Image (cartoon, coloured by chain):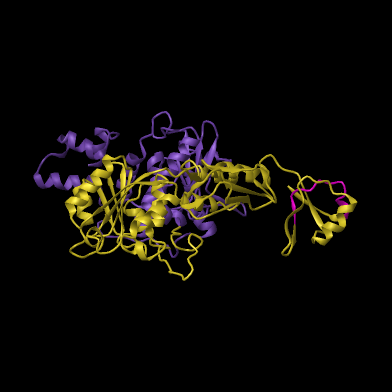
Amino acid sequence: MQDFETLLKGSAEAHGHLCPGQVVGVRMAMLGCSLIGLNEPSSHDQIKKLIVYVEMDRCAADAVAHVSGVKLGRRSLKFMDYGIMAATFVNLETDSAIRVLSTEDARDLAPLYAPEIAGKYQQQLIAYKLMPDSVLFKVQKVLVAISEFDLPGPTRRKVSCQRCGQMVRDSREVIIDNHVLCKPCAKGAYYTNAREITWPNMNWSPVSDFRAKKQQQNIPIALEEPSTSNRLGQQGTKSHRETLL
Amino acid sequence: MIKTIPLEDAIGSKLAHDVTEIRPGEFKGPAFRKGHTVCNEDVCHLQRLGKNHLYLIDLEDDEIHENEAAAIQAKALAGDGIIWEDNPKEGKINLYAEKDGMFVVNTTALAAFNMVEEVMCATLHTNTLVKKGGLVAATRAIPLIMKRAPIERAAAVARQNGTVFSVHLLRHAKVGLVITGNEIYQNLIEDRFAPVLTEKVSALGSKVCALKFVPDDAEIISQAIRSHLGNGCDLILLTGGMSVDPDDVTRQGIRKAGAHELHYGASALPGAMFLVAYLGDVPLLGVPGCGLYHQITVLDLVLPRILAGEKIGKKELAFLGHGGLCLDCPTCRFPACPFGKTA
């Protein structure tokens, strides 16, 4: 693992600013990863062994993700909306799981650790660097039963909602009265009054932009192999592109 | 795990904790000690103490009794010069000074320790002069039984910088006095500073080894400082010339002597115009005129700390502010008063 200051600098850049939450998050991840034996969590041989549950959507969550290398889209980062400054670090290889909680004591003790620093924000920033882990955190050994549907890897199941027809992945469907439903249909959603709309320029695509530009320059499109290839990505074949164009 | 049983069913059981008896103005202490086997004769006594039920304790693997917790706490808290008997009474351990000296507390670590809910520790103020055998602190666990982990975390918090408190010996300094002021140098008035400072220095176990009277002349003051250093003085006290008048040149004299670090002004009254400087490792303390009038001044707060080996700088002088106001009581009770109790 990189040293603390290097990790903090990278985390602050990724997050957008340096703040006390970044200090807590970086240290939380350093401690959690080391306690489950993954000292190089972003390395090739460890990255697939780690899952992290963050219990807050605050600055510290970004720092935890930055240090541990976990990502939502890779299914290695799980967000549990508890509003608790804590994260649990799971080693999939050993099944060891450590929950690290940021103590409220640390906030009260910041003025004592950095009495010469004026301003609550700066004082916490410095104090959280000075405090030992024993003051900044409580640590619990926990058991985490991870469903196979929560693990990284390919989609394990897909079913359609019998009410709205939406495809539901990874066993997130709900069965009510023997009907397979998506969660919004079954339990309501964070949104309401959903209705489909149309919008201007509905037929835009990255490829349509490219085609318009070349037509303006009067250049035969099919001959622009490298540029077309870049826009379509590595997986596109020439015949497929020609079909598109 | 704790189980509660009626007193009448407790005959033959061992007490899970000390049972305290308080007789106002007469006695406070354990009437029965932990582990005592309750017998018929004890029942009336326990009832008089308001005990109609007793605890039976069956500790789980991850649990700890208050006595064991107190022992762990005392070991983690205590540093050099602290002694205690590993025999908790009523779940509490008292800690004592092993020697005369300066009792120093890491107040931040103490606060962090006390933030752990299951434990407590109370101490004398930091930077208190203590005598061998004097009580300086006491610690106990709050519950009768608790999980072991919080106690071990509290112990780790206590050890974050080594220990939480200790007693530092005062070094025996060879003190050089520089009494400035034309009025004294020219025998217009009698000096009263030298006897006052000599008494304070002696009371702390150090000795005034050299004394010079000098006029308000920066060059001559610097020569006096150099002379004391040449004679082996390892602490220099200077009086007078610390104020704002044009004749007040003691600071210039200290600079001329080569002081590499100089802090003028302390957040304490009396003693706002106090000065601390360093020439090499030798501290130079500039004592303003208040030292003549007031029995206790900032010098009484700083000098023992210097002798205990503390480096006094801008921060330390500034932090004197909270608690740095002497009430100038008709009968001075220092150090048993708020003056200098900064934390």
Observer-nearest residue: B202 or A159?
B202
- Give the magenta range: B8-20
Residue occupying image coordinates x 34% and y 64%: B290
Specify the farthest residue to the bottom: B330
Q: Position of residue B300 (x, y in %)?
A: 41, 56
Observer-nearest residue: B27 or A96?
B27
The answer to whether B247 appears left or right of A89 in the picture is left
Magenta segment's dominant SS is: loop
From the image, state the color of chain B: yellow
Q: Relative to B261, does residue B341 appear above or below in the rendering?
A: below
Q: Quadrant of the C terminus of chain B?
A: bottom left
Residue B308: within the magenta?
A: no
Q: Position of residue A190 (x, y in %)?
A: 46, 60
Residue occupying image coordinates x 43% and y 42%: A29
Specify the farthest residue to the top: A45
Observer-nearest residue: A113 or A153?
A113
From the image, state the color of chain A: purple
